Image: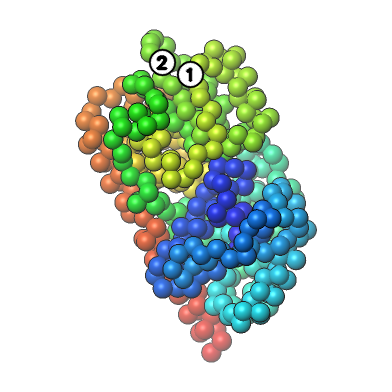
Amino acid sequence: MLSAHSCPLGRLGTRDTGGMSVYVLELARELGRCGHLVDVYTRVHDPKDRLIYELGPNARLIHLRAGEDGEIHKLAVYPHLPDFARHLEDFRRRHHLRYDLIYSHYWLSAWVGRHLQVWWGVPHMVMFHTLGAVKNALGVGETEPELRLRTEECLTKNCHRIVAATPRERESLISYYGAPAENISVIPCGVNLELFRPMDKEAARRELGLDGGKYILFVGRIEPLKGVDKLLQALSYFSGEPKPRLLVIGDENRRDELKRLRKLCRELGIQDLVSFLGVVKQEELPRFYSAADVSVVPSHYESFGLVTLESLACGTPVVATNVGDNENIIRQGQTGYVVPDNTPHLLAERMALLLSRRDNAAELARLARASVMGFGWSTIAQAVIRECQRLLAGEAACRR
């Protein structure tokens, strides 16, 4: 497995460490538990990084040098990809390794995987996680460079299989890049059901130092594409007392965006209702989900929607825009609401509905968790394994 620009063991919620890193780490561990031997290659992000980290039975993470040892913008990784590929091949030869299949994540890794598939003569499977063409079509946030778009289009036609997280992503691959429909398989992302599980709400709030009011939670990177500004505007629609509080968990290093959002809070007069908490460790997130009354995903674009899965697994309902696979994950009116877009008054209306519910909280939590039990990593890993087996069988048949 290749995750060149983002280390699966990096701090979640920071600039280039998000849902993809969770996917790679959790899937590698689960494949290892199933008896498959998995090596995940990434670049050195810290001079203190060890060469090899054990991720679990049969799964390990290997750091390779590609450019300077430290955090650099992901696009700056591109010129160093040939070095990454060569160092990977040197490591493979030194340790007498032979791989049956390559699974690349994101377009930068897929560039490396394309070369490895030629060198090794093995199948190459790609998961893009996000698509540059879709981001540019939205016109929100940074414009993706033409280099990315050309590379993604080329890769869709020169790998053996593409894994899309949603039917919507499959259609985007076909419409924007002309990807062969028969080479795209849809396999959703998963959630760690052992980590993300309901906790007693009052106990969770005591541990976090929260009072007995209503709490709304946002978890994600602090960037325009995530729509945090729309959520802040939605919060300003609430009248009466006491007003709900908003907890924002995300990368405190996005200083310009954070400054913009704090300014917006002051302009809206809600600065006392919003707490920007920075990055929270993955193992601490279930406490926040359980303490909240509702989680909100106001994104303009998501490749899947891991936050939705995590929140529901902890028993907390979700209000989310119709992005990723939210429309298939959320049971409308029961475990939350999907809104057409992040128009503030639509978000506010649905949040208010959930905050005003007087249903049995324990029963709601049970229903929310039950709704995502089919997304456990063991289930997702089995789907990936079946895809790999079909791909390998097809390659073997071609050789014959």
Q: Residue at x 44, y 21 (%)?
A: 245
In the image: residue 310, left or right of residue 251: left
x then y, percent, for residue 119: 68, 78
x then y, percent, for residue 59: 49, 67
x then y, percent, for residue 309: 40, 45
Q: Quadrant of residue 7?
A: bottom right
Q: Residue at x 40, y 51 (%)?
A: 191
In this figure, which residue is indicated by the disc labeled 1?
273
Taking depth in this image into account, of 153 and 281 the one nearest to the observer is 281
**Sequence-earlier tag: 2 or 1:** 2
Q: CA distance from mark 2 to mark 1?
A: 8 Å
How many numbered marks does the figure carry? 2
Taking depth in this image into account, of 15 and 167 the one nearest to the observer is 15
Q: Residue at x 49, y 43 (%)?
A: 281
In the image: residue 398, left or right of residue 76: left
Q: Name which residue type carries label 2.
A: Lys
In this figure, which residue is indicated by the disc labeled 2?
243
Q: Residue at x 56, y 46 (%)?
A: 11
Instruction: Identify the element where label 2 is drawn.
Output: loop
In the image: residue 99, left or right of residue 254: left
Label placed on residue 232: none
The answer, for residue 152, to whether it is visible in the render is: no
